[in-house]
Amino acid sequence: MNVHDSERLAGMLEEAGYVPFVQGVTPDLIVFNTCAVRENADNKLYGNLSHLVPVKAKNPGMQIAVGGCLAQKDQHTILKKSPVVDVVFGTHNIGSLPVLLERARIEQEAQIEIMESLVEFPSVLPAKRESAYAAWVSISVGCNNTCTYCIVPALRGKERDRRPGEILAEIEALVAQGVSEITLLGQNVNAYGVEFGDREAFSKLLKACGEVPGLERVRFTSPHPGEFTDDVIEAMAVTPNVMPQLHMPLQSGSNEILRAMRRSYRQDRYLGIIAKVRAAMPDAAITTDIIVGFPGETEEDFLQTMHVVKEARFSMAYTFLYSPRPGTEAAEMPDQIPHAVKQDRYERLVAVGNQIAWEENLKQVGKIVEVLVAQGEGRKDGDTDRVSGRTPDFRLVHVTVDPNQPRPRPGDVVTAEVSFAAPFHMVADRLVSVRRTKAGDLSELPPEVAGISLGMPTIRVGTA
């Protein structure tokens, strides 16, 4: 969601007359779009700002802006810790950035504008996408849950839903531009419709996406297990362009810890959803988020999480050590777990998760898979003469180029035979076919002609 907001910031700035900076030249503007979910975001922001102190001293006309969740949380603290910042703006008013920058220049003093509720839905703002073939589409912002470890509802506010017609109009416009894959975004994406009272709005939206001509792949993130209903599973199974991939945050496998987290499901409910998904879509790949070392977590609680991981057989588990976030209930809970204990459990869980992911990928060896070639997915593609991309179930595949076939471009679709599997990627050494696409054509044009950004999306906008 922050990456999508950064695209909106980039689009607004370019509309206001800014141009992308050139490597080797000091930019006039640097924008940090921040997260606040984990403590590392704070450290990353203030570390980067400290490095800019001597740069700004040499270039006093350069402006620095800080926005996003950390700006919403810290507000005036940012200027106290880092006086080099010119503008601080929050999650609810990203559209104000160009005006705030101009005001800071004219008044020669820092500007802070933090709104307590959403000013305008981010998707009404212009965007500068990084990709010709893939796009994010926000369907809701905010969250109505009160998980005790999470600060997001305090920073993003209560859930606000867009109307289906607005969403589908945006998707149709994106497809007309050459986009073949969209990802529906929401803090709690499957709760979509709560604001206008339709409990099946999300499943209806998925099916409606299936009616958009030219839209080949539909994904969504992130759902909440407590609100994951059978109609959504059915919509995924019957809508051909909805991909057989599901990111379903677990957080913990222990009922006691889930209760302490104020998560509205228990182990049986979670595993039941996984079973239903696999019954409807046997080849679905499921990923998850897990927090290790939540306050009060015992060894038995941790073993319950290990049990769910072994039962669910995730293709990927994003595992995090619990870190207290000021302003959350969990930060004040007793029985905080020592770091050494958290680290030990983390390493044990990661080892099991990686082994399962590897075993699941090994099942793909020998299969012919369809890969949407991506921009910059493979760091060693230049050395190996491979292209990289994602299968329908979101597995990463590095495909060896065949000199007798057209070279695949970002946005093109290839079919290839998987020849090797590792825990987090696969290799396909036999290229079967290449399908050229409109997005692939656009990827060969200069960004200013294609109307997208294939590199850094702004004058220096990053997600911290």
Image (spheres, helix red, strand yellow):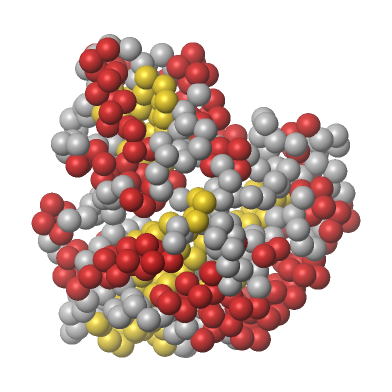
Judge whether 196 appears above or below 363 on screen: above
Q: Residue 261: where, in percent of width, then height?
A: 76, 48
Q: Quadrant of residue 251?
A: bottom right
Judge whether 398 appears above or below 84 on screen: below
Please count the marks in the image.
0
Q: Is residue 334 left or right of residue 95?
A: right
For image coordinates 31% across by 47% down, the residue present is: 125
Q: Quadrant of residue 294?
A: top right
Q: Is residue 336 left or right of residue 283?
A: right
For image coordinates 27% across by 86% down, the residue present is: 433
Q: Residue 376: where, in percent of width, then height?
A: 32, 58
Question: Which quadrant, please, contains the C terminus?
Answer: top left
Q: Is residue 71 visible?
A: yes
For image coordinates 39% across by 33% down, the residue present is: 32
Q: Residue 226: where, in percent of width, then height?
A: 71, 63
Q: Is residue 242 visible?
A: no
Say which of 318 and 402 sits in front: 318
Judge whether 123 appears above or below 69 on screen: below
Say which of 26 and 163 sits in front: 163
Q: Quadrant of residue 458?
A: top left
Q: Residue 20: where, in percent of width, then height?
A: 20, 40
For image coordinates 60% across by 34% down, the residue present is: 39
Say which of 66 and 104 sits in front: 104
